[in-house]
Image (cartoon, rainbow, N blue to C red):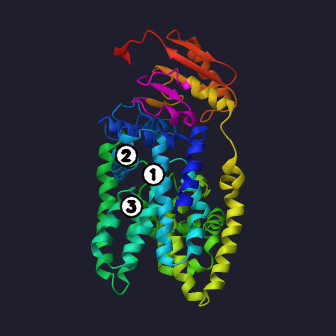
Amino acid sequence: MCIIFFIYSHQSIKLYLAHKTRGDLTSFAQAMWNSTEGRWMQSTFNYSVHNFWGNPKDDIPVNSNIFGINFNPILFLFVPIYKLFPTPITLLIIQAFFVALSGYIIFLLSESIIWQISFSLYFGLINAVLHEFHASTLTIFFGTLLIYFSQNYNRIYFFLSLILFLLIQENTAIVAFIFCLTLVFSRKNKLNGFIGSIVTLVYFFTVIKIFIPSLSNYHGYIFESIYGNKLGNNFFSIITNSFKNPGLFLETIFNTINVKYLMKIYFPVFPFVVLSPFNFLVSLSGISQNLISSSNLLKSAAFHYESSSIPFIYYAAIMGSKKIFKIKFLSFLIIIILTLISYKKFVSNKLSPTYFFQNIYTLQDKKLDEIIKKIPINASVSTQDYISGHLSHRQELYLFPVYFDKVNYILINNNDFTWPVKYQTQQEYIKKIISNPRYKIVYKDRDFILFNRININKNNF
């Protein structure tokens, strides 16, 4: 476990220092830093991202709460740690620690180091832990913890782990609900499962209908439509339309993209995973939102969107392997082969031994860090998401071009990396800024350009 933790944290930190993390880490880091300053879970950057992606508002209040986007109260547990070590790296280390620790729980459940190694090298897990920081990635640990205590029949620990699992993010309640339903059919866990299913269902709708809308600048839950889908724009319409129009439901679920996605997700543990049908069903519930979504990004299996499924995928495989082979050596051999194939095909470019020792911090990265030092800590900034993580400890931070005409500083890549806008569009914004008499160029070369706003009228800002 210690070796895995070191590898995960080392690679995550290396990616951050080389400016290869993106805006999600920024949003969480800004919220955590604001919390240590008494401004609980405020993040202007998170809202600026959603402003850019089609949820525009006239303004983004400084006190915009990150829980109005996704509800992640588990983060409160880590605020004291962040107070001691106020850097985005702290979040990356916390994430790496819990994901590595989840491998040990898999070992306890399977009583096999082979399963622990396979779990730790599962491409979905590695993609999640190396793709910035996301609260939902913590479901990998708390999901395995929930499974473990459900099997040890300790009611207090079971409900404690269930509560922690629910506090990670609102949509974990869907997985928890299905998991609790499966316990209703077990011999010794019926009562836990029955109570848990009611609690998770009530919690889920309370959060998405009351808590999130009350905290959101949009006064609603923007992910209820699941990045868009054919079945409806909220959970009620999705459920009702699935029953009213089963043909549309089947068309939404069973298509080429989804089939390829499922084959990729379950390949490392096939056929064991399908031999434990209840647990297999729970793992499917964790990716159900991805399956019905119209967004192919959710089905790329390259990010963190499968996190809540991973513990249940492996638990189903462990339980299924006990049914198909009495000879452990044979099942272990199959798992080793599948793990090596999936690692080589889906992971090695991110976590290969050569990549581990490779220096990815370039002269351009060094120059960017020097430019960042020119920006005062209390200044408002609009910048690109890959730069934003190193500017996250401030009250006002926005995704360029959001607020490009209102902030104190603008820092952007002036060369080949202009996301989220196209190069030509960014050049048009630069012309607007240069023509604005209230801005001056502080630094400019072929790679970066830094603007500073002068003679700011605070009453108009």
Look at the numbered discs 1 and 3 and tell me whether their residues touch, using CB distance below 8 Å. Answer: no
Label located before the other in sequence (2 or 3): 2
Residue 127 at what x, y percent from top left? 59, 55
Secondary structure category for the residue under label 1: helix
Neighbourhood count class around disc 2 (C-alpha, 10 Å): few under 14, some 14–19, many 20 upward: some
The residue wearing badge 2 is 81
Label placed on residue 94: 1
Residue 146 at what x, y percent from top left? 39, 69
Q: Which three-letter amino acid code belongs to the residue tagged 1?
A: Ile
Q: Which three-letter amino acid code belongs to the residue tagged 2?
A: Ile
Label located before the other in sequence (1 or 2): 2
Secondary structure category for the residue under label 2: helix
Label placed on residue 212: none
The answer to whether residue 40 shows anywhere in this view is: yes
Position of 323 with respect to 30 (left or right) is: right
Position of 79 with respect to 136 (left or right) is: left
Label located before the other in sequence (1 or 3): 1
The answer to whether residue 245 shows anywhere in this view is: no
The C terminus sits in image quarter: top left
Q: Is residue 383 magenta?
A: yes
Closest to the observer, 323 or 305: 323
Range covered by the magenta-colored residues: 372-396
